[in-house]
Amino acid sequence: MSYILSVKNLVLSRDGKKILRGVNLEVGDREIHSIIGANGAGKSTLAYTLMGLQGYEQDEGSLIFNGEDITKLSITERAKKGITLAWQEPARFEGLKVRDYLAIGAKGDGGVTEEELKEALRKVDLKPEKYLDREVGEALSGGERKRIELASIITMKPKLAILDEPDSGIDVVSLKEIVNLIQTFKENGASVLVITHRKEIAAASDKASLMCEGVILRSGDPLEISEFFKNRCIPCDSRVSPPKAA
Amino acid sequence: MSQITLNTLPSEIKDMDAAYSAAGGDAAVLHDHELASLVISGSKVLNANGVEGIVLETQETEHGVDVKLTIKKGYKIPHPVHLCFGLIPQDGLQEIMMNFVAEEDAAVELVAHCTFPNAIKIIHRMEAQMHVGKNASLKYTETHFHGPYGGAQVIPRAKVKIEEGGSYYNNFSLVSGRVGSLEFDYDVDAEKDSVCEMVTKVYGKKDDKIRIMEKVSLNGENARSVIKSRLAITENAESEFRGITEGHAPRSRGHVDCLEVIQGNAKAEAVPIIRVDNPLAKVTHEAAIGCVDKKEVETLMARGLEEDDAIDTIVKGMLA
């Protein structure tokens, strides 16, 4: 299997504490890969480090994306290579129109048509006529802003979408739509690295990895990993009995 | 309907049309006889066009023009009234004395563009009296363009009175080109059941100086107001904002909201002042000064924008 992303021995410290302690991870081409783990396991930190955010520059390790070493590239350079990130809590963007926000990611790809903007909103279950000319920060709910952020990734057409808990702030009824959306990314040729607590999302993945205290403990079948997390790692969350690395 | 075009050379009209367009206006509206408009270049009235329900009077003075614009009782003007004030030369003085009256039950939207595209040493002073009659509505949108050199000193001052049930909306914008020096001072008296909303948006660069003073006195029962200021300053620009709301009457409600974004060596000061002397009144405020939100910048960078373009997009959005 060819890999779109290979992470080797990724180490990151913040305030003198190691948050990532040698992460090794491989995400396949057109693969939906879930990262599962307890709060504080380092999942979001991993996502930010992969995107190259300020303050999340790794101390050690390498990132190979699409066969190219991107370890030293900036956020923008990584985005131009085809990596993007959806935050768990999206930014507010006062005054920025939804249509302008959705068009930003498509700039390097010859722009985006009006119909593509509308279709992106439909895919996240928002009516274009209601949302396209509104402001992103215009008193929209967290769930609405989340959907708009996901729509901005649809128009960007990335090779790898890193989604940090895409289900947070979204009701259970809509969870199926999020799962469908992740499948749509894959159908459009993208790989998806999704950080989640939801077994529904993990179950829709091709592969899952379990993260604990800054390392990937094991990777494999999503249902097995979910069961392992449920049965073995909940005690870990209360710091009673940390599991041994596989 | 009346159309006045006096002692005007075609080149003057052409220059003002270009200046009006530079300020973001559509010059065609100034020549549409179905629309009310007023064009003043320096101390000269180039065009004054009234429509039914509007009385427009102008008097040229040594350094400017005295303007009286009255919307007659009960008239709802269907299309905006377009105003253009400007100075084409690099230096000069323009003093506009304005008296706007929206009589009882009248409604009008005034769209003003103030344009000084070549300003090196220009002073533009506006002294306005605005009277919003009982149950009348006055919406005043003022967009400025001061050119690229920072040589404009602009001093708009207004005293506004809103009668019972009246509505006054003011939207001031100076976000393209340089500011130069801006001393903005609006003072509003709001009577019973009236509504006042004032929004200012300014983008200062280099050594621009911005001083904004807005005051609303909620004198009448159930009067409501919002003062909203959005300022972005960069390089060595300086800004000072004072937003004052006084609640003097029962059930009056006011809010002051200032958000400033600074970059480089810019300096900003924001002071919301709220005073209440009636126990049934309520006035609130919020003010924030800071750099551009890091998450917003990184989100746009994660969509492929360079950092400077991301910041520019965010600032322009805030000032849009």
Image (spheres, coloured by chain):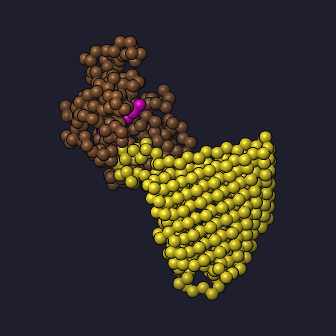
Q: Give the quarter of the figure containing the N terminus of chain B.
A: bottom right
- Residue B105: quarter of image: bottom right
The residue located at (34%, 30%) in the rendering is A16
* Chain whose colour in the figure is brown: A
The residue located at (60%, 77%) in the rendering is B93
The region drawn magenta spans A160-166
Most foreground residue, B195 or B96: B96
Magenta segment includes B16: no
Magenta segment, prevailing SS (helix, strand or loop):
strand
- Residue A195: quarter of image: top left
Picture coordinates of residue B184 (x, y %)? 62, 62
Picture coordinates of residue B102 (x, y %)? 75, 64
Picture coordinates of residue A202 (x, y %)? 36, 25
- Residue B157: quarter of image: bottom right
Is A50 left or right of A122, judged from the image as shown? left
Is B42 left or right of A41, judged from the image as shown? right
Magenta segment includes A161: yes
**Count of numbered labels shown in the rendering:** 0
Picture coordinates of residue A11 (x, y %)? 27, 31
The residue located at (27%, 21%) in the rendering is A218
- Residue A58 shows in this picture: yes
Most foreground residue, A80 or B202: B202
Image height of A224 relative to A135, above or below: above
The residue located at (28%, 27%) in the rendering is A21
Most foreground residue, B9 or A237: A237
Image height of B59 relative to B246, above or below: below
- Residue A162 shows in this picture: no
Chain B shown in which color? yellow
